[in-house]
Image (cartoon, rainbow, N blue to C red):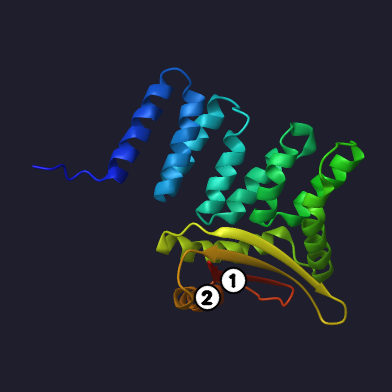
Amino acid sequence: MPSTVTPLVREWRAIKREIDALMTVDACSAWELAGAWKGLTGDFDGTEEAFRNSVALGNTGTNEVNWMINRLNLGKFQAGQDIYARVGAPELGQFTLALREGFAAGAIAQAARFIARAEEMQIEWDMEEADDLLQAHAILLDAGIPDEQIASQLDVAGTVLRRLRIRPIIVPLATSADGLFHGVTYSLTVPVPALEAFEMNVELAEAENQAGIKKDVAFDVVFEEVRV
């Protein structure tokens, strides 16, 4: 009788064996790998436990940044900002690695402060990476929108993403047209047809209203279908 075990199940079992084997020689890295694995399954609590164990055992050079990435993948933006605040400073050696994820988390003012500190320290890096972030910072600073407000609105979108078990591609967009419009939009690109993305936006609007989110023309969060 042919096996009913699917290739995906075999792949997951192989990953589990790899983690178990690594646990005996490098538990810190093994827990980091376990956290990423749990993140792929959508298990937020399991992801948190695994990364917490990894960080408690030491610094792999990537475990805290990967913890932040997995929080964002699971729609936990304030939690992602919390990690960025403690690992993104240029003195800590992960400044460029963490900057993109800090922007994705909505930690725009925090990232701008880290950028200013990196410039004071004369750290050499590709400043072009920060252009969009600094433009977004200028817009939101003028509008009086702090990182915490950004995270609150993104976290509401996260509840929709977790319900549907969807991992988004996070694309922050800063738009500035003199005399017309200045705003920042977080486009959460999702692998669904246009109609489903529209329905997700309807659900998001209702959830924002229930959560008491105060909308501002200078900041918005939207779901967008993947365009091919």
Q: Nearer the viewer, residue 213 or 21?
A: 21
Give the farthest residue toward the top: 25
Give the farthest residue toward the front: 228
The vertical placement of 35 against 226, above or below, is above
Residue 156 at what x, y percent from top left? 54, 66
Q: Nearer the viewer, residue 58 or 127?
A: 127
- Residue to which mark 2 is pinned: 201
Q: Residue at x 53, y 57 (%)?
A: 75
Q: Which mark is residue 63?
A: none
Residue 30 at what x, y percent from top left? 46, 28
Q: Is residue 44 left or right of residue 88?
A: left
Q: Quadrant of residue 126?
A: top right
Mark 2 Cα within 10 Å, few/some/many (few <14, many 20+)? some
Q: Is residue 88 visible?
A: no
Question: Which mark sits nearer the N-terminus, 2 or 1?
Answer: 2
Q: Amino acid at mark 1?
A: Val
Residue 135 at what x, y percent from top left? 82, 62
Q: Residue at x 69, y 40 (%)?
A: 97
Q: Are marks 2 and 1 in contact (CB under 8 Å)?
A: yes
Q: Quadrant of residue 76?
A: bottom right
> For numbered disc 2, what is the local secondary structure?
helix
The vertical placement of 201 against 9, above or below, is below
Q: Residue at x 39, y 48 (%)?
A: 41
Q: CA distance from mark 2 to mark 1?
A: 6 Å
Give the farthest residue toward the bottom: 180
- Residue to which mark 1 is pinned: 222
Q: Is residue 27 visible?
A: yes
> For numbered disc 1, what is the local secondary structure?
strand
Mark 1 Cα within 10 Å, few/some/many (few <14, many 20+)? some
Residue 21 at what x, y percent from top left? 38, 23
Q: Amino acid at mark 2?
A: Asn
